Amino acid sequence: MKDDLKKFKLILGLILLVVILAVCLIIMRGKIIEQEKNKNSALNNIETTNVQKNNNSTLNNIETTAEQINQINNESINSITTEETDENETNNSVDENNVNEELILKEVNSPNEYFTINQYLQEYWRNQNNAKLQKSGRLESGNNTNYCEIMISLLNDEYVKAKNITESNLNNLLQKTENFYVEKMYYSKYKKLTIYYCSGLATNYDDDSDVNTNYAMIVVWDKTEGTFSIIPYEYVLEDFADIEVGKEVKHQFIQNSKNLYNSNISTYKPNDFDIANLYLVLYQRYADYDIEKAYNCLDEEYKNQKYQSLEKYKKTAIGTTVGAMSSCTVEEDGNTIIYHCAMANRGNITITEPKFLEFTIKFDE
């Protein structure tokens, strides 16, 4: 019995020990779990704090970046605005200083151009004079050509429309029978057209004392089509009085369509005789109508030796004629051309040309 009781107590003690151990394990496990929870909670707090910190840092970075972007954008906008302003100022400056070379009025230095355009002018004058004779009944009988119709076909369409020119009111252009001696010729371009501004001396056949020393006309030439048209003196005075050599001519020119009369003249290539004769004719016209200009055409050394003054020149030169030229020879001295003209009824004449349409004359007496 005693042995059984001992065994029972031992087993009970063992069971109690196991229970105690189990309870301890449960308690320890609970504490471990709680510690784990606390640890996890702490870690979560740390992570949350870090996330918040990171978020705040990111937000700060984003805000900083946004500020930087805004600053950059503002600087870019300011830069672009400044560039646009500078560009506009530059463009304005270019607009003010940008000169269209084609519109610039320049001197004609080509004898070929001068003589070709002068042909057009002479064709116009020939038809104008015939139209006047026809209107007055003085044209030779049997001539059925309608010169008034030809005149209108040669006049530039802009002028004809602006002045409402018709055959019946063409008399205003035919009041004087004139001839035109071109002293200076200038040109500019407009699209495919070349515009020639011709100035010089115009005479009246009906009244020898009636002369205009500041006459001007415009020839509009389409080299591609080979057509020309004329803008007469009166319209030149009204619409082109302010043109200047070296300045742009800001005018929108038009050209007539090709017709029977405005395209039948070919390019004229003058020879030395033609050019020398042109200078002799101009000098004679000056001697007849503008004596001071004739005096200034004389070779400087010759003028000083023979005349010394304009008054003395007037006493001997007025009423004299140059006469006809029979032949001409040419020599060159650098860029200067010298024409030796043999005259039919007097001694030789030497013409010195440093530049086309600029000349001096010396009589070899």
Image (cartoon, rainbow, N blue to C red):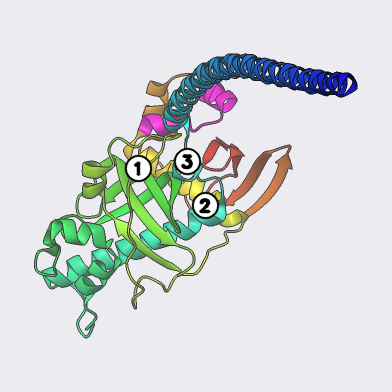
**Which badge, 3 or 2, comes first in the chain's sequence?**
3
Q: Which is more N-terminal, label 1 or label 3?
A: 3
* Range of magenta residues: 291-306
Which numbered tag is attached to residue 358?
A: none
Task: Report the residue at 43% width, 28% height from top.
Answer: 88
Residue 263 image position (x, y, % from top left): 41, 72
Report the residue that reaches farthest toward the right. 3
Q: Which amino acid does label 1 sit on?
A: Lys
Element at label 2: helix
14 shown above or below 291: above
Q: Marks 1 and 2, Cα distance to the nearest angstrom?
A: 36 Å
| Residue extending farthest left | 168
- Please provide percent x and percent y for residue 207: 20, 49
The Cα atoms of the two marked residues, 3 and 2, are separated by: 36 Å
Viewer-side residue, 269 vs 19: 19
* Residue 128 among magenta residues: no
Q: Quadrant of residue 193?
A: bottom left
Judged from the image, the secondary structure of the residue bearing numbered disc 3 is loop
Q: Distance between the residues labelled 3 and 1?
A: 10 Å
Q: What residue type is labelled 3?
A: Asn
Residue under numbered circle 2: 277
Which residue is denoted by mark 3 in the rendering?
A: 100
* Number of numbered labels in the structure image: 3
For the point 75% across and 20% down, the residue is: 25
Q: How crowded is mark 3: few (under 14 residues within 10 Å), some or many (20 or more)?
A: few
Q: Which is nearer the eye, 24 or 210?
A: 24
Question: Mark 1: which secondary structure?
Answer: loop
Q: Name the residue under label 1.
A: 250
**Residue lying farthest to the bottom in this orientation:** 142
